[in-house]
Image (cartoon, rainbow, N blue to C red):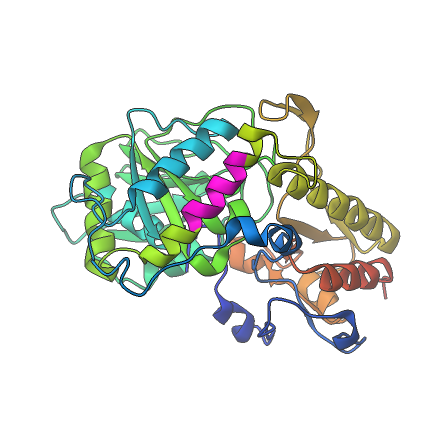
Amino acid sequence: MVVANSSSPSDSINNNCFPCSNDTMSLSNLSNNSIIDAQKGDPLAFGSYWKQMSDECTVVIKGWELMSYYSDSSNMCWFMLPELRDEIERLHHLVGNAVTKDKYIVVGNGSSQLFQAALFAVSPSDVSDHPINVVVTAPYYSEYKNAINVLHSRMFRWAGDATLYDENKPYIEVVTSPNNPDGTLRVPMVNSLAEGKLIHDLAYYWPQYTPINYEAGHDIMLFTFSKCTGHAGSRIGWAIVKDIAVAKKMATFVQSSTMGVSKESQTRAAKIIAVICDGYQNFKSNESELFFEYSKRLMRERWEKFRGAIEQSMVFNVTKYPRAHCNFTNEISETYPSFAWLKCEEGIENSHHCLRKLNICGREGERFGVDSKYVRISMLGIDDEFNEMVKRLSNAKKE
C-alpha cells in the first residue's frame, strides 16, 4: 500500500516497462523511442529539494549503534524508536491531518506491511471456512487485491467493489482518501446491515496533494513516509490506531513477519521529519522554501502543464477537482494528485494502448476494477521524464 498506495518495481517489469537503475536520468538519455515508465509510483519528484537540504538531513550512525532488536521495551510497539514516534506526532500536529492524542502508533516496513497487519488485526480471531470479506470502492488501488490474495489467508479474502457488496455477512472496507488512482476524496460506501470494520488509507492526505480540510480521527489510519516526503526507499510507514488491542495485534504481525523495522531507516525518517517541522517552527525560509510549500508549488506547476497537454491532444480527458479551503495553508486550494486518471475520448476503447503508441507506459484501468477506457499515469517522476511525457501527450492525435 507491495500495498497501501505504493507501487512495486515488479509491476514495471510485468508490463514491459523497465525502471531506471538510478535516481536521476538526464534528458540526453531520452529519445523518441525511449519508453517512459509512468505507471509506477516512484516519488522522485521531490529529489531536488532534498538535495538542497543535504547537510541538514545528514545522519551519521556509528558501527556500534542501533545493534539491538529492541528500541523501547515500555512501548507496545517495542521496535519503534521513541524519536520517530515523537516526530510523527509532531508532523501531524503541524499539518493538522490526523489526531494522535490518546491513540497508538505502530511503525511498519512501509504502509504496505501495515495494510496486511491491519487486516490481520481486525479479522475474527476464530478462523473458519468463511473468511471475512474485504471490499474497496472502484476504482481502487491496484495492489490491494494482490496483497490479500498472496497471503492465501483463512482469515480474510478479497471481495471486490464496495458499492456492489450486498452480502449479509461481516466485512472490512478499505477507504482510500485521497484515492489512488483518481485523487478523489472517499467515504465508506458499503450499504449493508452487516457488521463492518473500516481501514482508512491516508497515504496521500498531505497538503501538496489535497487541501487539508479536517483532522482525521478514524479507528485505523495508514500513512507512509514515501508519499509524504518522497523517501520510498526507506520503507517506513506508520498506523495511527484508536484501540490498543488492535494496535498490539498489528505490532505482532510486524514482529512475526520481519522482527520489527530497520532502525537505520527509522533514524533517517525521524531526522527528515524533524527537518520539515523545524523549518516551520523556526521560520527558516529565507534561503529556501519550506517543504510543503515547495512540493505543492511543484505539483501545481506540473498539473498546469499536464492539463494543457491533455487539452491540446483531444485524445484523453482527466478528472477535475473542486477547490476547497485548506486549514494548513489557510487558503482556498486545488487538488494536485500524485497520479493522473485519464479516460480516452469517444471512439477510443483502450487508453493504455493509446499511451503505448507514444512510448508511455501507464497502468491499465482493468487493474483498478474498471474498464480499458481508463489508465493511470504518475505525476511524480523526475523532471526530464515528466517534461518529455507532457510533450508526447500534447502531440497525441486521434487516428
Give x and y (percent) for residue 286: 70, 35
Give x and y (percent) for residue 99: 39, 26
Residue drawn at (60%, 45%) of the image: 182
The residue range painted magenta reads 269-278
The total of numbered circles placed on residues is 0
Magenta segment includes 277: yes
Q: Is residue 131 left or right of residue 301?
A: left
Which image quarter: residue 26? Answer: bottom right
Q: Is residue 28 left or right of residue 171?
A: right
Q: Is residue 83 left or right of residue 14?
A: left
Which image quarter: residue 172? Answer: top left
Q: Nearer the viewer, residue 107 or 17?
A: 107
Asked whether the viewer can see residue 100, the reply is yes
Give x and y (percent) for residue 50: 60, 52
Quick check: 357 above or below 368?
A: below
Q: Nearer the viewer, residue 120 or 280?
A: 280
Residue drawn at (52%, 59%) of the image: 367
Asked whether the viewer can see residue 358, the reply is no
Residue furthest to the left in view is 126
Q: Is residue 334 left or right of residue 260?
A: right
Quick check: 175 above or below 267?
A: above
Q: Nearer the viewer, residue 335 or 376?
A: 335
Residue drawn at (28%, 49%) of the image: 117
Magenta segment includes 131: no
Screen quadrant of the C terminus: bottom right
